[in-house]
Image (cartoon, rainbow, N blue to C red):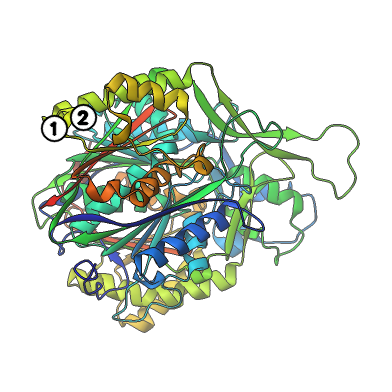
Amino acid sequence: MAETQAKQPDHWLALGPPGSGGSWGCRIESVGVKLPAQRLTTRDLMSQTSHRTRIQLERLTGIHERHVVGPGENSFTLAAGAARDCLAHSQHQPQDIQMLISTSITRSKGRYTQSFEPPLSLYVKQAIGAAQAANFDLSNACAGMLTGVFILQGLVARGEISCGMVVSGEYISHLSWNAARQIRSLFSKQLASLTLGDAGAAVIVERAPSGTGIDVIGFTTLAEHSRLCLAFPSMVGPGAQMYTKSRTLQKVAIDDMAPLVAEAIGEAGIDLADIDFMIPHQTSARAIRAGTREFVRRLGARPKHVVVNLEEFGNTSSTTLFVALHKYLEEQRIHKGDRVMLLALASGIEIGIAIFTVDSQVDRYGHTH
Amino acid sequence: MGTRIEAASALTSHGLRKPTARRLADAAARTCLAHAGREPGDVDMLINAGIYREDNMGEPALAALIQEDIGANLGQPPIGGHGTFSFDLLNGTCGVITAIQIESGLLDSGVIRLGAIVTSDVDPDHRDPGAVLLQPSGGAMLLGRDEKLAGFTDFSTETFPEYDDLLASGLVWQKRHGYRGPRQAAGQHEMVIECKPGYAARLADCAEEASRRFLRRLGMGWGEIDLVVPAPSSPEFLDALVTRLGVPGDRVAYVTEDLEGAYTTGPIAALQAAIRSGRLGEARTTLMLAAGAGITVALALYRQTPS
């Protein structure tokens, strides 16, 4: 056993292979999104609360509206739609995908509020014609998609696969409706449930020459704070309810995230000012601004742009990072050579960081495509 | 250099005051760490591959709660230390082998130094105890690196979606009918598991087909497999499979009677039986085989030969 009890890594994050023995690079090749057509404004949502709350949700969070599912839509249809959109932006065919991971918290399909077995990933791969892919589901709260990328990046870097897909379909607006029945004031622990919107997202990662692609990807779980955000099946209606200690969560996240971001950018050999676009988990505009201010104070530098897309989508849970990345690619605001940092924050507390440089994938987005 | 099984522990709810899925996993993890002579803080990655829980909590991942319970690297990240990364993986009975594949790769590339896999399930359908044979149980295994051992060398996962409707489960909202008081719930979510006749037989068919294909790909014959560690343990599946493959009974790791019916814990329970009997230690080449809903068949080859 002495042989196996080697010195532990000298960093807090579990960091992906580049710099630790990966034979190949791994790049994000394509991003796809599926948004339900139906939209719900914050004003309309708040007009349907059971109690007169006097909460100015739009002013507090910056969320004007969010997409919500219509009849026949659920986690599966959002995930499959996003996977098809991802393939439409990709140079790969469905049969190229060797592993498909479904990472949504919600797994609604058919009559089930939440499907458990078989895994949702099985149905998604069948729907897109990737029957040959190995598949499984994982659940890591709002950090699910980036966790999937972390796993695939390891497999690609070691040469076990050359192409994989991470997909997530989050039908979570039922949490908003369940919260709207119960919320009475600004201090309700269900307040964060009113910020949620539905979306599907998918990402294809592929083999790249060694030393290119994702510069750094790392994760850790600060489990001492595991109970700051809990979601479970509702007793007031179909779907779930979520209880969040938002202020504590924000304080802990800011305190603990700063040294982890420092660790990640140190591993990448860059400075925070070298990040062109920082895409944080989308919770509220105020929280993101406060977090950025604290990063700047502690790390002594500022990323060039901090992406906030809450106004249009709200918090779409595990898909937020890739919905935001997709939007900026489609709007051609991100250019070839830009360095992007994805910053996942999730119940657990899960903190995930990925840094990569955008390359030719930008050519397949926007009106010029 | 390869991935080495440091320890495996599986247990039933017997002796636990309130056998929730979390407590079953906690107990198994603590036992496993003690067997391996490891501290919780040594664990770099913790994957929970359990499925059926009494609360069906959506977030956080149960793995994070287990990490907190066992005390693996809690607190603020200091510079120079190392943390633990935890998440849940859902792939039914095959979840353990999928988790081994993930952790084995990360061990190989030096991303982690010690990986833990935990599982637990409780009876998902309290209304109809006879509906599905599921033994409430928890399991844990530890994977480490060994410079001299080949360890886990090959993996395969195959799905047979033509049988995806033979076993399906999910939460269904059941509205309360009749009079409801002001503080009474409007309804509740109930776990529904539908298992159609012939599931175990098809499971054996698919497992046979996938394992034969796997060994053919590796250029190996059944004579080279010293030990098969299978899951699930139900006789309808296992007896049919072993007979068809022609593997002698003394080369199969059967779970102990108390762990028969263990669900996601099945592979760990079989592994524990193999360790206790000394057969895992003697086997040069071990095939881990799991089959579950989908139908999904997961296979892993473990070689205790020089790397």
Badges 2 and 1, same chain: yes
Chain assignment, label 2: B
The quadrant of the image that shows the N terminus of chain B is bottom left
Give B261 or A292, whichever is nearer the viewer.
B261
On screen, residue A113 versus residue A7, left or right, reads right
Q: Residue at x 69, y 31 (%)?
A: B128
Q: Is residue A137 above or below residue B209?
A: below
Task: Identify residue type, mark 1.
Answer: Leu
**Residue with the mark numbered 1:** B218
Q: Position of residue A40 (x, y in %)?
A: 60, 42
Which quarter of the figure has residue A1? bottom left
Q: In this rendering, does residue A241 appear at all?
A: yes
Q: Position of residue A49 (x, y in %)?
A: 75, 50
Q: Is residue A231 above or below residue A261?
A: above
On screen, residue B100 versus residue A79, left or right, reads left
Q: Residue at x 16, y 57 (%)?
A: A337
**Circle 1: element type:** helix
Give A258 or A107, whichever is nearer the viewer.
A107
Labels 2 and 1 touching (C-beta < 8 A): yes
Q: CA distance from mark 2 to mark 1?
A: 6 Å
**Residue with the mark numbered 2:** B214
Q: Is residue A344 above or below residue A100?
A: below
Q: In this rendering, does residue A347 appear at all?
A: no
Q: Position of residue B64 (x, y in %)?
A: 48, 61
